[in-house]
Amino acid sequence: MTYRPLPPPVSVSTSATIGVGRDDLVSGEAVALDLPAANIGLRILSGLIDCLLGVAVYLGLIFLLVQSFIGGGFFTNTGLTVALALHTCIIIFALVAIPTVTETFTRGKTLGHWILGLRTVRDDAGPITFRQALTRALLGFVEIYSCWGLPALLCAVTNRKGKRFGDLLAGTYVVRDRFSLDLPTPAPMPPQLEQWASTADVAPLPIPLAIAARSFLGRVDKLNPIARQQVSDQLASQMVRFVAPAPPTAAPPEMVIVAILAERRRRDAARIERDQRLRERVAR
């Protein structure tokens, strides 16, 4: 087995956002996780289901409107004005209000999304808001209903995440809601280094270094003893540069790698939980 040494971390920034785009999630070890976007076929089928629902509601309300005006002065000037006003309200209700309210209260789901297991999320993978749902519905009326879906289709096939113009303006995209990320189970904190790690200052690791450490732990059992020792020594020597004070000198390098990653994961999880509690208090 040949081993290619990792590049030295000189001039590598410690920022946890280097190399991470706005469309990425970031794990506790500064590794970008990209939720899988729904493919074009599912988007088209979901859109057709939603369009059929919107048109069905529109036609049903128009039928009721016509029935209510038959024999009631429909062809007078006042009747035509009222009919046009009600027709506009029906369009807004059936094609804009229904998808907006539905996506807002279901946190990104329409009827088509629910049937096909899709969900609309923000670019940071969070649940969409009323403003974003309204933006998507308003642009959807133009690019889907008014233009027969051609602008939405052309935009989606040229975008990496299949976004239509409404998604680009709202900062959203559609993901497969029933898809689960198959991530390896992180190694637990070694009891021998738990006290040191809890009091040490552990800076965010550079993304290439964090990925290399996770990859090493995932295939550690497949390496021969010599390569395993070499890789663990090199990774540990690079990772301890982001920790103060240094770990105990007697600690095995492999155990140091596990401890640093586990501590970073614990602290980031605690930070995310604090931020969530703060947002909940502010939203009240």
Image (tube, rainbow, N blue to C red):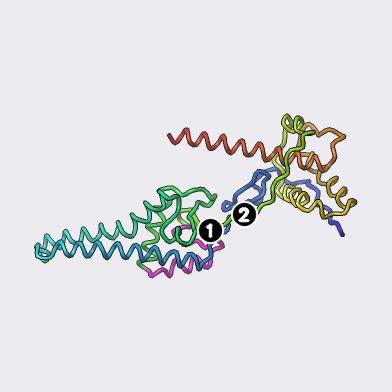
The amino acid on which the numbered mark 2 sits, given as a three-letter code, is Leu
Question: Which residue is painted at 48% across and 57% down in the image?
Answer: 168
Whether residue 33 sits left or right of residue 122 in the image: it is right
Residue 131: x %, y % from top left: 41, 49
Residue 180: x %, y % from top left: 59, 55
Question: Label 2 crowding class (10 Å Cα cut-off): few <14, some 14-19, many 20+?
Answer: few
- Residue 97 vs 63, above or below: the answer is above
Q: Quadrant of the C terminus?
A: top left
Residue on which the image places disc 1 = 176
Question: Which residue is painted at 34% across and 57% down in the image?
Answer: 96
Which sits earlier in the primary sequence, circle 2 or circle 1? 1
Residue stretch rendered in magenta on the structure: 147-167
Question: Which residue is painted at 28% across and 63% down in the image?
Answer: 58
Q: Nearer the viewer, residue 96 or 114?
A: 114
Asked if the magenta segment contains residue 92, the reply would be no
- Residue 136 vs 232, above or below: the answer is below
Q: Assign a secondary structure to mark 1.
A: strand
Residue on which the image places disc 2 = 181
